[in-house]
Amino acid sequence: MIQRCHKWRQKRKQYIDQARQTTDEIERERLLQAAEHYGRIVNAEQEKIDYSRGGAGEKLPDTPVENTENNDEEEIPLPEFIENLK
């Protein structure tokens, strides 16, 4: 669960970085919407992690995420309205 959350955070950062570098306004908006999509996923997943740790008020320090080659991680598709902007 934590590894997926970390992966989605990286994906969100990637989209934001790409949006900062592009000069095309439409492409920038598409990238920012994709980043926002992953931000919502990360927030929802973080709530699950916090809940499983004993509640949102008791956060434990983050542990480094090992980079493993698990194929069981699911890829969350982008919403249809983002896909149609291409």
Image (tube, grey):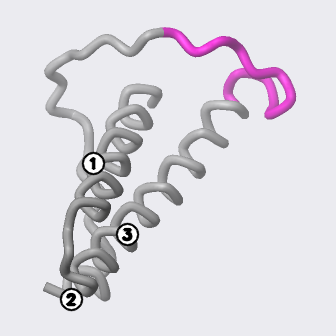
Checking the image for residue 85, the label placed there is: 2
Q: Where is 85 relative to 16, above or below?
A: below
Residue 59, magenta (yes or no) = yes
Checking the image for residue 32, the label placed there is: 3
Residue 65 horizontal side relative to residue 46, left or right: left
Q: Where is 86 relative to 65, above or below?
A: below
Please give the residue where the numbered disc 1 appears in the rendered image: 14
Q: Amino acid at mark 2?
A: Leu
Identified at 13% across, 85% down, the residue is: 86
Residue 80 horizontal side relative to residue 50, left or right: left
Q: Earlier in the sequence, mark 1 or mark 3?
A: 1
Q: Earlier in the sequence, mark 3 or mark 2?
A: 3
Identified at 26% across, 46% down, the residue is: 74
Q: Mark 3 and mark 2: span between their CA atoms?
A: 12 Å
Q: Amino acid at mark 1?
A: Gln
The foreground one among 54 and 40 is: 40
Identified at 19% across, 81% down, the residue is: 24
| Residue depth check, mark 3 versus mark 2: number of the one nearer the observer | 3
| Residue depth check, mark 2 versus mark 1: number of the one nearer the observer | 1
Identified at 59% across, 49% down, the residue is: 43
SS class of the residue under badge 1? helix
Q: Position of residue 60 (x, y in %)?
A: 71, 14
**Which region is colored magenta?**
52-63
SS class of the residue under badge 3? helix
Secondary structure mainly formed by the magenta segment: loop
Q: Position of residue 31 (x, y in %)?
A: 29, 69
Quadrant where the image shows the N terminus: top left
Instruction: Check whether the beta carbons of the residues at disc 3 and disc 2 lie within 8 A of each other.
Output: no
The foreground one among 30 and 25 is: 25
Q: Amino acid at mark 3?
A: Leu
Q: Mark 2 and mark 1: span between their CA atoms?
A: 18 Å
